[in-house]
Amino acid sequence: MCCFVVLVYLEWWFTAPSVVQAPRRDLNLMKALLNYSTTNSAISTATSEKLQRHLWYLSEELVGLTLFDEDVSLAMKRRMLESMKRQVEDEDEETLKRCSRDLATLAVSQLDSFASPKIVRLFEKLYLATDFLEADPSSWGTNRTFRAAQDQLKTLKVVNDHAERGGGGGSSHPGSGSTGP
Ligand SMILES: *[C@@H]1O[C@H](CO)[C@@H](O)[C@H](O)[C@H]1NC(C)=O
Ligand SMILES: *[C@@H]1O[C@H](CO)[C@@H](O)[C@H](O)[C@H]1NC(C)=O
């Protein structure tokens, strides 16, 4: 357990949680937990299965926060914009759904594969203007609409625990949550 904490967990626990980084961090933590199977498969399985039940930030809607994550490449953001144009089957489904991919799929998933047209709902709920979505991500840094939205999102805290209570979906205490207290 000590090796696990030092090698995998500490980095995620101690870097300050920012809501726009949450989708990327959750996905990267999941990949690190899965990869830990080469060291200790029991710990890898236990922790990745636990985290799997808490992947709210990889929902089709909240993954949109990634568009404001400065550590995500422009290429990835362009691919996310493409995914936002694709058709979804349950267009009218209003409930926020946690990511439900199996572990093998998560191990090879990239952020853009979670993106969907539902990201627009995130902006609607937060009353954020979306005109910058029409422009290339390379111009967003100087676009006032984008910057205003980014500033507003920076004031939001990561709330895995609250999201789970609100969504009624969590099954247990998020002891292995990626986002810290
Ligand atoms: C996966 O685990 C191995 C062995 O612990 C490590 O050397 C490698 O860097 C890890 N890869 C990733 C992508 O974390
Ligand atoms: C942001 O970008 C969009 C798309 O190019 C543009 O229509 C809008 O005017 C820009 N907003 C600001 C405030 O610069």
Image: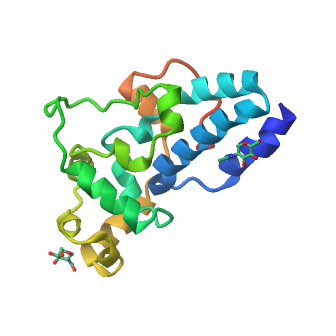
Task: Say whether residue 126 is visible.
Answer: no
Residue name at image x 17 percent, y 30 percent: 89
Q: Which image quadrant: the C terminus?
A: top right
- Whether 57 is drawn above or below 43: the answer is below
Q: Nearer the viewer, residue 147 or 140?
A: 140
Tell me which image quadrant ligand 1 sits in. top right
In the rendered image, residue 31, in percent from the top left (x then y), is placed at 59, 40
Left or right of residue 35: residue 56:
left
Left or right of residue 114: residue 134:
left
The quarter holding residue 172 reads top right
- Whether 23 is drawn above or below 145: the answer is above
Q: Residue furthest bottom?
A: 142
In the rendered image, residue 18, in percent from the top left (x then y), is placed at 52, 56
In the rendered image, residue 141, in percent from the top left (x then y), is placed at 36, 77
Q: Residue furthest top?
A: 171
Residue name at image x 50 percent, y 39 percent: 108
Q: Nearer the viewer, residue 115 or 97?
A: 115
Task: Say whether residue 15 is visible.
Answer: yes
The quarter holding residue 88 reads top left
